[in-house]
Image (cartoon, helix red, strand yellow):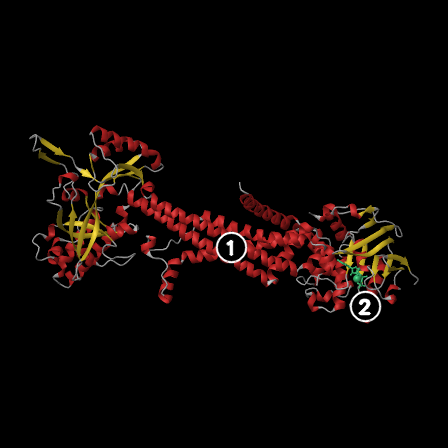
C-alpha cells in the first residue's frame, strides 16, 4: 500500500470508530452531551448550513447513483431480454448451416430451457401508412423468428404492443359498435362484426403472425392490388414508424403496408453470381415491438423465420452439380441460435457444453468458419460486453465523483464546526470547570456531527426519494417550462428515466454521509476536548 | 466516563481539619522568550468550614491561584493536596470528577451557558455527573434540589428564562446555585461581586455569608475589595507571588 492509501484507509477506519464513540458517549456519557448537542443544533443556525450541505450532497449522490444504477439495470435487463441467455452467432450475414443439428444437441444439455434459430438480414422498408401521402423509406435490419418459440427464449413477445388484453379490448369495442349499428340498422354492422371477430381470433392465437383486421379492410386499403388480403404480416420496431415511448397507437397504423426489399447474401462469395440479389415483397403491418433497446426499436422489423429464410434463399435446396451430375443438397442456414436456460442456471457455466456441442456438429459436417466471421458461442453479456464495459467505466467515474463530493461535505462540516468550537470556547471552559471530562467535550461535538449526519442524510434521502420517483414528471416539466431536455433517448437508449432506488445504494450512501459528518466534526471535537479550561474561560 | 463511578468518597472531615493545602506553589507563564512568574512560593491551608478571602492588586495572580486550587490548571512546582491526596497525581478525568463533585466555582463574569435556561444552568453539574438514563431516573429529585437552591437565591420565579434576559446580580445568583448543585465541599468564588454595583454586590456577599454561617460552607473567595474581605474568617494577601496573612 502506498502512503496515500494508508492515510485514506485510516481515515475510512476512523470515521466508524468516531461514530461508535459518539453513540456510546450520548448513551452512557453525561446527560449534558445530548442536551447541549440538541441545543446547539436548534439554537446555532450556522449548523443548519452544514445540515443542508450534507442533505444536498446526499440527495445529489443518491439521485445520480439511482438514475445511473437504474439505467444500468434497465440496460442490462433489456439487452438480456433482446437476446436471451446465450447466443450462437456468426459475424457474417450469410449465416451457418446445420443449425438444426446444433439445436437438437444443445437442447439435450441439462439445464437448457429452449433453443430457437433466428435470421438477421438487411433490407429497405417502404412503409405506407394510411393517411400519409409519402411512405417512410428506411433501411432496416430484418429479423426472422419463430414467434411461437421465441417467447421461451427472450422478451420479444412481451415487447409487442397488441397483447391479448389490448386485442380483447379492441374486439369488445368493435362488438359494441356492431351492436349499436345493429340497433340503428346501419350497414357498418357487418364490417364491425368481422373486425371484432378478427381481433378476437388474433387474441386467441397470441402470439402469432395473424393479421388483426378482416380481409375486407385490407382489400379496401389497397383496391388496386388483386391479392392484398393474402400479404403476410410483419412486425416493426416502434421507432421505425416514428412511435416514441408510450405514444397512443392509432388504428391506422395497423392498416399500413410495408414494401420490403431484402438483400440476399450468398454463402459463396467467390461465385460472383450477381443475379437474384434482391427480393421484394409486400406485407401488412400487424404490430409494433418496443424492446426498450433503442437500436432494435429504431431499426428492426420482424418476419416469420421460414418466410425470411425462403426470401433469402437460405432454406434447404437440392441442385445438380454441373461437374459430377450428382444431386446435391444445400442445407438450410440461419444467422444465430438463441438459447435460454432454466432458472438458477448460470449461462456462463453452461457455455462450454454448448461450445462443445456446436464444435462437434461443425466437425461432423466438416464445416469451417474462419475469422472474421467465426462461429461464436457467447452469453448475452459477453455479446454486449463493449457496451457494458463502457457503462462500467462511467460508473467508476461516478464513484470518484462521489468521493470528491464526500470530501466537500466533510470539509464544509469541518469549517462550520471549527467556527462553532471557536464561538463556544468559553462554554467549553465553563463546562470543563464544572467537571466535564475531555471525552465528554469530544462527545458533544462528535454527537453534534452525528446528528447532523443523521438528519442531513435522512433529509437527503427523503429529497432524493421524491426527486427520483418523480423524475420523469420533473423532466417533462422542465422541458415544458425551460426547454431543458437532459435525457435524450438517442444517447440513453430508453425513453424514460429510471425512477427506482436500490436499497443497497441507499444504505451505503446514507452511511457515508453520516460517517462524513462525524469525520468533519472530528478535528474540531478533538480541538475542543484538548482545550485548557482556564484559557477557554479567558476567551473573549 | 460516568462520573459516579469515580466519585471520590471520603468521610467529611471534622470542622476545622485541613481539607485543601498548597505548599511552595509556583506558576510561570511563558510568552515566547519571556517568562512571567505569577506565583513564586505560595503556601496555604484551608480548613473545613472556613471562609477565606484572598486579596491582591489586579494582576497579582489571584485568579491563577484559585484555578490551581480548584484543579482547573496545573502548577509549575509545589504540591496541592485535597483530602491529603496530591491532586497533581490524579488523572485528568479524576480531577474533572473532583471539580464536578467536590468543588464549586463562581466567576466574576457569571459564565452561564447561553443556550440553557436558568434551571438547566443550575443542573449543569448534575447533568455532567449523571448519564442519560441515570439523570432520567433521578430527574424529579435533581430538579427539586435545583429549584430549592434557586428559591434560596430568590430566583425561583425565573426558571425558564435564559441568562441573557437576567441582570448581573440575578446571573450571579444562578451561578452560585449552579456551584452549589452537587453539594461541593469547597466553594471557590473569583471576585463574585466584581462586576456588580455596590448594593447588588452586598446582596451577593450576604448570600455567601449566610451559606457559610448556616451550613458551614467552606469558601475561598478572591476580591480586591477590603470591605468585602472583612466578612471572611481570615484574610490573605497575594503580593509578589507570595501569600501572607493580613490584618482584618
Ligand atoms: N495564560 C496566560 N498567559 C500569560 N500570562 C498570563 C496568563 N494568565 C494570566 N497571566 C498573567 O498572570 C498575571 C496574573 O493574572 P491573574 O488573572 O491571576 O490576576 P488577578 O490577580 O486575578 O487579576 P485581576 O484582579 O485583575 O483579576 C497577569 O499579569 C496576567 O497577565
Ligand atoms: Mg482575576
Say which residue appears at 52% left-offset and 58% top-offset: A53
The answer to whether dots 1 and 2 both sit on one chain is no
Residue named by callout 2: B201
The chain ID associated with circle 1 is A
Residue A1 at x, y = what percent? 53, 40
Is there CB contact under 8 Å for labels 1 and 2? no
The residue lying toward the viewer, choosing from A528 and A347, is: A528
Residue named by callout 1: A458
Residue A397 at x, y = what percent? 43, 50
Residue A151 at x, y = what percent? 26, 43
The chain ID associated with circle 2 is B
Extreme residue in the front direction? B33
Q: Quadrant of residue B147?
A: bottom right
| Placement of the C terminus of chain A among the 4 image quadrants | bottom right
- For label 2, the crowd category at 10 Å Cα-Cα, with few meaning under 14, some 14 to 19 and many 20 or more, is many
The local secondary structure at tag 2 comes to helix
Residue A370 at x, y = what percent? 24, 35
Residue B48 appears left or right of A195: right
Say which residue appears at 13% left-offset and 46% top-offset: A277
Task: Note whether B51 is above or below A300 in the view shown.
Answer: below
The residue lying toward the viewer, choosing from A434 and A64, is: A64
The residue lying toward the viewer, choosing from A386 and A427, is: A386
Residue B70 appears left or right of A341: right
Extreme residue in the right direction? B247
Amino acid at each position: 500500500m502506498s502512503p496515500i492509501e494508508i492515510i485514506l484507509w485510516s481515515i475510512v477506519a476512523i470515521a466508524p470508530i468516531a461514530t461508535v464513540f459518539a453513540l456510546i458517549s450520548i448513551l452512557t456519557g453525561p446527560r449534558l452531551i445530548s442536551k447541549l448537542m440538541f441545543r446547539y443544533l436548534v439554537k446555532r443556525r450556522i449548523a443548519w448550513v452544514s445540515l443542508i450541505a450534507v442533505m444536498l450532497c446526499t440527495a445529489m449522490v443518491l439521485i445520480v447513483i439511482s438514475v445511473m444504477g437504474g439505467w444500468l439495470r434497465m440496460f442490462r435487463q433489456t439487452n438480456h431480454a433482446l437476446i436471451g441467455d446465450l447466443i450462437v452467432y456468426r459475424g457474417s450475414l450469410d449465416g451457418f448451416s446445420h443449425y438444426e443439428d446444433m439445436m437438437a444437441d444443445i437442447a439435450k444439455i441439462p439445464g437448457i430451457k429452449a433453443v430457437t434459430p433466428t435470421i438477421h438480414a438487411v433490407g429497405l422498408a417502404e412503409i405506407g401508412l394510411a393517411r400519409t401521402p409519402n411512405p417512410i423509406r428506411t433501411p432496416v435490419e430484418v429479423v426472422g423468428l419463430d414467434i411461437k418459440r421465441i417467447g421461451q427464449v427472450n422478451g420479444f413477445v412481451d415487447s409487442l404492443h397488441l397483447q391479448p388484453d389490448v386485442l380483447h379490448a379492441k374486439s369488445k369495442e368493435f362488438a359494441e359498435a356492431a351492436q349499436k349499428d345493429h340497433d340503428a340498422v346501419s350497414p357498418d354492422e357487418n364490417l364491425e362484426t368481422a373486425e371484432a371477430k378478427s381481433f378476437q381470433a388474433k387474441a386467441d392465437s397470441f402470439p402469432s403472425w395473424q393479421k388483426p383486421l378482416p380481409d375486407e379492410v385490407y382489400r379496401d386499403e389497397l383496391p388496386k392490388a388483386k391479392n392484398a388480403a393474402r400479404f403476410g404480416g410483419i412486425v416493426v420496431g416502434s421507432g421505425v414508424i416514428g412511435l416514441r415511448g408510450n405514444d397512443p397507437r392509432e388504428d391506422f397504423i395497423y392498416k399500413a403496408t410495408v414494401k420490403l426489399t431484402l438483400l440476399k447474401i450468398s454463402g459463396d462469395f467467390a461465385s460472383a453470381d450477381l443475379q437474384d440479389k434482391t427480393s421484394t415483397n409486400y406485407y401488412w403491418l400487424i404490430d409494433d415491438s418496443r424492446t426498450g433497446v433503442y437500436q432494435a426499436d429504431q431499426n428492426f422489423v420482424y418476419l416469420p423465420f421460414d418466410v425470411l429464410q425462403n426470401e433469402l434463399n437460405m432454406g434447404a435446396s437440392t441442385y445438380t452439380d454441373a461437374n459430377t451430375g450428382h444431386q446435391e443438397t444445400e442445407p438450410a442456414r440461419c444467422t444465430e441460435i438463441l438459447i435460454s436456460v432454466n432458472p438458477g442456471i448460470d449461462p456462463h457455466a453452461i457455455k462450454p457444453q454448448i461450445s462443445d456441442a456446436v464444435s462437434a456438429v461443425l466437425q461432423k459436417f466438416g464445416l469451417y468458419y474462419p475469422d472474421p466471421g467465426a462461429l461464436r458461442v457467447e452469453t448475452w453479456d459477453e455479446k454486449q460486453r463493449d457496451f457494458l464495459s463502457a457503462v462500467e467505466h462511467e460508473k467508476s467515474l461516478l464513484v470518484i465523483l462521489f468521493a470528491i463530493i464526500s470530501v466537500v461535505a466533510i470539509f464544509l462540516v469541518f469549517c462550520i464546526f471549527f467556527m462553532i468550537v471557536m464561538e463556544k470556547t468559553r462554554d467549553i471552559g465553563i463546562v470543563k470547570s464544572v467537571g466535564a471530562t475531555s471525552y465528554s467535550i469530544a462527545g458533544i461535538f462528535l454527537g453534534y456531527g452525528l446528528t447532523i449526519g443523521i438528519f442531513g442524510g435522512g433529509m437527503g434521502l427523503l429529497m432524493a426519494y421524491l426527486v427520483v420517483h418523480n423524475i420523469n414528471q420533473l423532466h417533462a416539466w422542465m422541458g415544458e417550462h425551460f426547454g431543458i431536455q437532459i435525457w435524450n433517448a438517442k444517447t440513453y437508449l430508453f425513453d424514460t428515466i429510471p425512477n427506482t432506488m436500490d436499497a443497497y445504494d441507499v444504505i451505503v450512501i446514507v452511511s457515508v454521509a453520516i460517517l462524513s459528518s462525524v469525520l468533519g466534526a472530528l478535528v474540531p471535537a478533538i480541538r475542543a476536548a484538548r482545550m485548557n479550561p482556564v484559557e477557554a474561560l479567558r476567551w473573549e | 466516563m460516568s462520573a459516579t463511578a469515580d466519585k471520590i468518597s471520603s468521610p467529611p472531615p471534622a470542622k476545622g481539619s485541613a481539607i485543601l493545602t498548597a505548599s511552595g506553589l509556583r506558576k510561570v507563564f511563558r510568552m515566547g522568550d519571556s517568562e512571567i512568574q505569577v506565583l513564586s512560593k505560595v503556601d496555604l491551608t484551608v480548613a473545613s468550614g472556613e471562609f477565606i478571602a484572598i486579596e491582591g492588586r489586579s494582576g497579582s495572580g489571584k485568579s491563577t491561584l484559585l484555578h490551581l486550587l480548584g484543579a482547573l490548571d496545573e502548577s509549575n512546582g509545589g504540591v496541592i493536596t485535597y483530602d491529603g491526596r496530591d491532586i497533581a497525581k490524579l488523572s485528568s478525568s479524576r480531577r474533572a470528577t473532583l471539580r464536578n463533585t467536590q468543588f464549586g466555582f463562581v466567576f466574576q463574569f457569571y459564565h452561564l451557558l447561553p443556550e440553557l435556561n436558568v434551571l438547566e444552568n443550575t443542573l449543569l453539574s448534575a447533568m455532567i455527573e449523571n448519564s442519560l438514563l441515570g439523570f432520567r431516573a433521578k430527574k424529579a429529585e435533581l430538579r427539586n434540589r435545583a429549584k430549592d437552591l434557586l428559591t434560596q437565591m430568590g430566583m425561583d420565579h425565573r426558571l425558564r428564562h435564559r441568562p441573557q434576559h437576567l441582570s448581573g446580580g440575578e446571573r450571579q445568583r444562578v451561578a452560585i446555585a449552579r456551584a452549589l448543585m452537587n453539594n461541593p465541599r469547597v466553594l471557590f468564588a473569583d471576585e463574585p461581586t466584581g462586576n456588580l454595583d455596590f448594593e447588588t454586590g452586598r446582596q451577593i456577599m450576604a448570600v455567601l455569608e449566610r451559606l457559610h454561617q448556616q451550613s458551614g460552607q467552606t469558601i475561598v473567595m478572591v476580591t480586591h475589595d477590603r470591605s468585602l474581605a472583612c466578612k471572611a474568617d481570615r484574610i490573605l494577601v497575594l503580593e509578589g507571588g507570595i501569600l501572607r496573612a493580613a490584618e482584618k
